[in-house]
Image (spheres, rainbow, N blue to C red):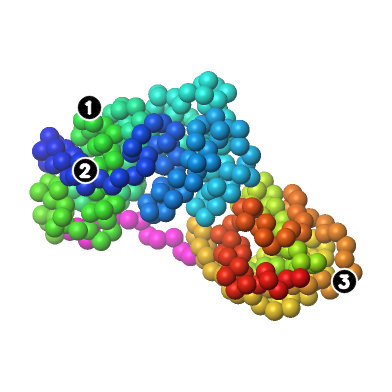
């Protein structure tokens, strides 16, 4: 591979074909950081919408640092991996407290911020500050697994190290940020899982293309086994209001709101499970009246099927006792939009809205 020609061909293509993304218009550190955290494991067309709403609500790092965690989680709702949003809040507070509100420029200092890894630090360093640091994400690994025709797993320590070394040798000092974005863009638009080799600007440098092994690269580890979980949740209605609770800090999805529920145990029907969960979690005896819907969703290695029921009290009213939550209470259906829910529960809320369930909850 001719390094100078490779870089020239890539940047020429990027100059003509790079997407007009909002953070590229003014690549200051805060904007780059927000976009890079959001873009992790998220389709770019979704990122643009989330980014625009986030920047309207938290236009700078000082505004973010002053925000309530609940407001930050609400703005993040739907992106998943909520620990990233919490870490952004912690990192913003760190920048204010330790760096006088100025986003650090030094690679190691950026990497020391909560939730910032090697890739994100490299992206901020190069795009916002023009430093010749590599930013190696999944797109970059895929591109170079093909350019180099790598037979070793590209996500292993050795494979990733090899790619980083090559990227470092290719980065032009005067266009470090553009180079890193160009490689990521190439992986997203051309050298994707279904490569468009006939449109690739660096086809002539690609060893896998020459060896006809493009579709065998990258070499990936065996996929993780999917674990299937059957769950229930109950939407308890009383006096036109709905019971919700906030998850504990050490729980899955800490700080998010939910309807009580849990896993279906062996030998239980879904209706029995939701009644048991209500008694265990909030000490209320309830009656599942009818099934609302079934929601399926995936997180990490889990595939969840959640059976959702409309419930009524099976006893005289008394205050719930929140054994599995930090707080909770009955709220009007129209204010559910103000609370951040995990994906499955948010889908349930949206379904009830679309099916006009809330109009019948008096």
Q: Which residues are magenta?
A: 213-227
Q: Which residue is denoted by mark 2 in the rendering?
A: 14
Q: Quadrant of residue 130?
A: top left
Q: Secondary structure at mark 3?
A: loop
Q: Badge 3 local density, few (<14 within 10 Å), some, or many (20+)?
A: few
Q: Which residue is denoted by mark 3 in the rendering?
A: 315
Quarter containing the N terminus: top left
Q: Secondary structure at mark 2?
A: helix
Image coordinates of residue 311 in percent, x first then y, are: 74, 72
Quarter containing the C terminus: bottom right
Q: Which callout, 1 or 2, points at the residue further toward the start of the chain?
A: 2
Q: Residue at x 65, y 72 (%)?
A: 357
* 253 or 340: nearer the viewer: 340
Q: Residue at x 59, y 61 (%)?
A: 346
Image coordinates of residue 306 in percent, x first then y, are: 60, 69
Q: Is residue 123 left or right of residue 322?
A: left
Q: Is residue 285 magenta?
A: no
Q: Residue at x 22, y 58 (%)?
A: 195
**Does residue 161 show up?**
no
Q: Quadrant of residue 9?
A: top left
Q: Badge 1 local density, few (<14 within 10 Å), some, or many (20+)?
A: few
Q: Secondary structure at mark 1?
A: loop
Q: Which callout, 2 or 3, points at the residue further toward the start of the chain?
A: 2
Q: Which residue is denoted by mark 1 in the rendering?
A: 174
Q: Is 74 situated above or below 92? A: below
Q: Is residue 276 left or right of residue 355?
A: right
């Amino acid at each position: 591979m001719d390094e100078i020609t490779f870089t020239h061909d890539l940047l020429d293509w990027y100059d003509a074909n790079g997407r007009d993304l909002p953070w590229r218009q003014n690549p200051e550190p805060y904007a780059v950081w927000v976009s890079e955290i959001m873009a992790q494991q998220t389709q770019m067309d979704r990122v643009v919408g989330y980014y625009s709403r986030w920047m309207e609500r938290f236009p700078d790092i000082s505004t973010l640092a002053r925000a309530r965690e609940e407001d930050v989680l609400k703005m993040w709702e739907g992106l998943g991996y909520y620990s990233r949003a919490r870490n952004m809040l912690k990192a913003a507070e760190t920048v204010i407290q330790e760096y006088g509100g100025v986003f650090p420029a030094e690679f190691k200092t950026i990497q020391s911020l909560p939730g910032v890894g090697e890739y994100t630090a490299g992206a901020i360093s190069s795009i916002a500050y023009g430093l010749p640091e590599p930013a190696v994400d999944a797109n970059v690994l895929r591109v170079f697994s093909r350019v180099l025709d790598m037979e070793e797993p590209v996500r292993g320590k050795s494979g990733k190290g090899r790619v980083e070394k090559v990227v470092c040798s290719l980065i032009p000092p005067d266009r470090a940020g553009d180079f890193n974005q160009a490689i990521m863009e190439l992986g997203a638009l051309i050298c994707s899982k279904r490569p468009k080799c006939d449109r690739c600007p660096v086809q002539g440098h690609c060893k896998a293309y020459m060896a006809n092994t493009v579709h065998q690269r990258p070499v990936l580890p065996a996929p993780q086994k999917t674990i299937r979980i059957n769950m229930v949740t109950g939407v308890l209605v009383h006096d036109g209001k709905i019971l919700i609770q906030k998850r504990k800090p050490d729980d899955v999805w800490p700080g998010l709101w939910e309807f009580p529920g849990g896993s279906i145990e062996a030998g239980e029907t879904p209706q029995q499970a939701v009644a048991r969960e209500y008694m265990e979690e909030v000490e209320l005896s309830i009656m599942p009246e009818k099934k609302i819907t079934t929601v399926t969703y995936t997180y990490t290695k889990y595939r969840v099927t959640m059976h959702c029921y409309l419930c009524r009290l099976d006893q005289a009213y008394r205050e719930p006792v929140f054994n599995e939550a930090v707080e909770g209470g009955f709220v009007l259906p129209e204010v559910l939009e103000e609370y951040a829910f995990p994906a499955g529960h948010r889908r349930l809320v949206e379904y009830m809205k679309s099916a006009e369930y809330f109009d019948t909850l008096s």
